[in-house]
Image (cartoon, coloured by chain):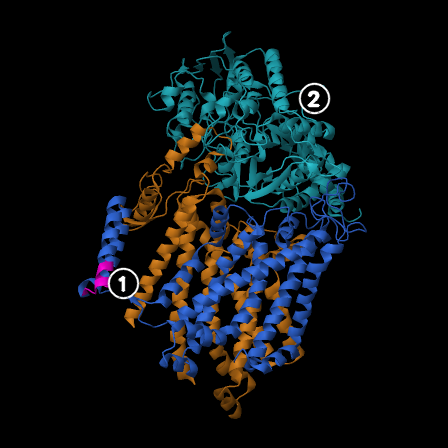
Chain colours: A cyan, B blue, C orange
Amino acid sequence: MRLASFADIRTLDPAVTSDALAAEALELMFAGLVDFDAQGKVAPDLAERFEVSPDGTDYRFVLRAGLVFHDGSPLTADDVKRSIERSLAPDTPNSFASFYDRIAGFEDFTTGKAPHLDGVTVGGRFVVSIRLREPDATFLSALAMHSLRPVCPSAGDKYDPTWLPCGAGPFKLVAGNWDRGRSLLLLRHDGYHRPGEPYLDAVQWSYGMNGVTQRFKLEAGELDGTRELSLADTARFMRDPRWKALGDYDSARSISAEGMNVEMPPFDNVEVRRAVANALDRDQYRLLRAANLEALTRVLSRSFRDEDPAFPGQKHDLAAALEHMARAGFPYDPTTGQGGYPKTIVYVVYKQGLIELTGQLLQQQLARIGLRVELKVVSYSTYLSLTKRRGTTTMAPEGWQEDFPDASDFFDPLFASSAINDEDSNNTSFYRNPVLDELLVRGRKELDPATRKRMYDEADAMVCADAPWALTYAYRSWTLHQPYVRGFVPHPVWSEYVAKSWLDRAATAVASRSGVLRDVRYAAGGAPP
Amino acid sequence: MNFLDPRAKGRFLRHRGARVGLVLVGLIVVFAVVAPLFAGQDPLHSDFAAGATVDGLPAAPSGVHWLGTDRLYRDVFARLAYGARISLLVGVVATVIATIIGAAVGIVAGYYEGSDGVRIPWVSVTGLVLGLVTLVLGHPQAAMILVFVSAAIGLAGVLQSIEPLRAGPRLDADTALMRLVDVGLSFPFLLLVMALGAALDKTSVTTIFLTLGLTGWLGTARIVRAKTLQVRNLEFVLAARALGRPTLAILLRHILPNVAGPLVVLATASVAQMILAESALSYLGAGIAPPTPTWGHMLYEGQDNYTAAPWLLAAPAISILVTVLGFNLVGEGLRDALDPRAQ
Amino acid sequence: MMRRIGKRLLWAVFVIWATVSLAFVVNNVLPSDPARMVAGPQARPKEVEKVRAQLGLNKPLYEQYGIFLRRLVHVGPTSPEANDPVHGSCAALGLLHFDLGTSYQQRRPVITILAERLPRTLLLAVVAVLLQVLFGVSTGTLAAAKKRTWLDHGTVTATLIGISAPTFVLGLILQYVFAHRLRWLPLDGYGLTAGEHLVSVVLPALTLGIFGAAYYTRLVRDELLGIEGQDHVRTARAKGLSSFRVWTHHLLRNALAPLVTVVGLDLGALVGGAIVTETLFRWPGIGALSVTALLDRDGPVILGTVLLASTSVVLSNLLVDASYALLDPRVRRGR
């Protein structure tokens, strides 16, 4: 299966990676104790089964028999513990280590005081137990991510940047098959624990390929799928019913918003923030990239829960916005243009196509309620520095990409006061709400799914009402595959999850002979069919 | 090749290229001044009604929007017109800054080329080098002491004319300035632009003037220096020196008018270069902050969808081409008029 | 003579040192955090702090500068292992080690990255300059020979347009016509095989080359027209030499000097990488590397590219000046 992408991957070491594109390859190379199934629920993978103690602090995983790494060595409980410790070791530059900080002994181990992680114990060849110091509802989801997945004995127990990535996933990397910045070739791992899988012999990525080139190659049959069609191409393909049927949407795993610093005027006034939340016309935002954006009215987008139209999220209501401005003490009269907030608000934006456009759109929309916005364009790295420092940035585009599929991931780092830091704050609004804080702490420990859902709905409603962020849109990728690609179902968590797909060779021949592909190519190219 | 040669003006006006150039430049200037007045549309207003297709793509040229709309559904013609003002302004002002600095540096460097210059005491030089080595080896305090002491000793030697202390290699203005130019030419442009942008904090038009002006004088300096080398040996310059005229007067009254010829040609070419550089700056993300329309920014915005919406790219590209061509033609004409040998 | 060369070399070293040091200072003064860029925007502050310590960014500036210079050229074991913590990122020539550090983002030795990318930039530079020279010399000569004819005027106009068009737009147009519509050439990228490399270099080289070709044509034409009136040419003509011989032997050789100057300077500048063209055509060369390194605040790579670019510019200046001195007496002798 041949895929391509515009971006490049930096590293394929599961303990260290932090970019979303590498995650696609990592998912195919490394299998974990647990993984997300087709419904997005945590299900056993390398483990045959697992048990959780009633108080939620003890997890016991029983490994399958006959597990084999890519290099042929057997996978045992010792390997699991070794991999976890390697990933969380003090010298390993793991960006996600703090997700696992509830594991007993985490503090001592990660600061180097203890040589081993006490909370992880091996009970024989096939049993691994993990003890938490307090219940953590996010633990299983975090465990299902790539960070702690077992790595071959060749990785040792310390991080080494020159190590050839080797794990127990359906596909393996053989030395020489990763041409940095150009291509990556993964071959089938015959020892994979699911019988018969994977169906594909190999998966190959080409990096640094332009979206338009990808479209050309797709039409010529040199590529089997693409997610990076340009705006015009996506529009054209979606209008053509034959191509449209071959495309799938990812789930919306990222949210975008206009972030307001609640410590700096005028956004220290909650009424002004509410005015902004009401003033935004999300449909206009959406139109900028209609195929991929959906309007966002609440923090937890559709990926987590079913749409509840009665939910009091943020809505477009110009009259209400003007009302809020009046209540804030800055009444604005749209007909005369008098009033509003007297000073100009500086909006820090970085160079990225869509963000620059939405920034300019924001200017126009906020002008309608008497807020004058001025854009300041900086590089992305400068933007990060400026927005994360206290007292520096009044307003800036914000967003969040789901680290792992759990509601807490959208609240704890963004709106909890524990995330506030003077120099390097993830909570860039510097929003502080003790009621929300307490709710989030309880939510992290609450193990009953129904109660948890209620708690996070409440948190969502609180954030929408207080509006440290004015939510704008959620982004979904649209993937297009060739007609001969079978078995591809968009996975709720992993992009381009092709472990269960195969290519129908017969169909390929038929397709080109019958001219289906050719006809569609002409239609996509603009000439009359 | 006197700039004030009266026949030069005639030659210039007879030059076909120059005439075409003047017409082009004139057209653009008129466009910049007049078009915004009757453009009709607001260049900053997004027209969601008539400016967007159902898919969210910009609208093609139509009766409402003469040159179509851009990615944010704003009228392209209006943006082009306002952008013309900015591009011309940036081109001219940045050129003035760069030309003044470049001429000053070039004349001084050329005039003092080969001269003895000042003597830098060996004591200070050794002190500086040793200080650097000490710093590299990790002792900043020791390094600072070394540098200060050696500089002080050297200075004392120079001021008090103590021979062994003030002996040293000579450094003349030309070498110093030209090495400065070398550093400037090999320094990465993008880093410099980012630094200037961060230092000046706002990406307003002034920032762009300064950025382009402060980076654009290097080439001018070199060429003016070469010309100065030729001019300084002319009779009236030697005569002025013999008469004991102050250097500044010589530079301004004798050298400057004689290098003015190539300088003016360089300046017109420079306007063209500055307009191109502004578009490169916008492309690299360091131009004037949006939503202000500049041709460079319109190019940058237009490149993503140029296959579906070619007018987005064509309009600013053709405008830039015409303007730059016009200035280059004028420059050509000036050069040929001032130097008929090349005709 | 040797003294002059010695002085020029010393100054060259000074300029390179000054440029790199200036780049170091500027890069560290800009408001942004390389550790955050490595850890990602969503990493928690504790993780970012860990990365910062690992990359040595916690040390005071002068210490970082000192480490950088110390490691630039030093002595060490003959063949260090790739994962040797001290010498793993060095390029070793016997006992002499050159070390530019390790890239924050790619976690690989900077020297390795530069060595990977340099041949690609060189390929682009050489092809572009070759095109420029071939086109410039031939067209410029033709135009000068047939001066005042329509050919001449047309050439002058065309070259004016060539130097007036923004590179980036030219690139897009070429890309659209040849890669999009006609699909003769790849849209961008470098390709995987040698054949693909050659095919991929055409469009970027053309884009880079058009400005240069126009400039060279004008240069050659101007030089030739300037020399034409001189005595030695009239003598040659009077002697009855064929027009062709006059052109090649007498005129071109004299016009070569400024052309060589410009070619040398161009090559030197292009080694630093043509940023806009490389970005447009996704050409994985030094130019694209320097842009991404700057945007990611990857200090070691930034300094590495600055070092490379400034060395190249300074060296080419030196060589051009030296060759100019060499060319001159030989030309005089040839008359």
Mark sitting on residue C62: none
Q: Position of residue B155 (x, y in %)?
A: 25, 59
Label 1 is placed on what type of residue?
A: Ile
Q: Would you call the spot at circle 2 few (<14 residues within 10 Å), some (14-19), or many (20 or more)?
A: few
Mark 2 secondary-structure assignment = loop
Quadrant location of the N terminus of chain C in the rendered image: bottom left
**Of helix, strand and loop, which mostly describes the magenta segment?**
helix
Magenta-tinted stretch: B154-162
**For this rendering, which residue is in front, A231 or A299?**
A299
Amino acid on which the number 2 mark rests in the picture: Glu
Q: Is residue A483 visible?
A: no
Q: Quadrant of residue C318?
A: bottom left
Is B71 or C281 nearer to us in this picture? Answer: B71
Q: What's the CA distance linking mark 2 and mark 1?
A: 78 Å
Q: Label 1 lies in what chain?
A: B
Residue behind mark 2: A307
A478 left or right of A178?
Answer: right
Q: Nearer the viewer, residue A401 or A528?
A: A401
Q: Residue at x 76, y 37 (%)?
A: A335
Of residue B185 and residue C237, the one placed in the foreground of this image is B185
Q: According to the image, label 1 marks what residue?
A: B120
Rendering quarter of residue A43: top right
Secondary element under disc 1, as helix, strand or loop, is loop
Question: Is B155 colored magenta in this rendering?
Answer: yes
Residue A256 lies in the magenta-colored region: no
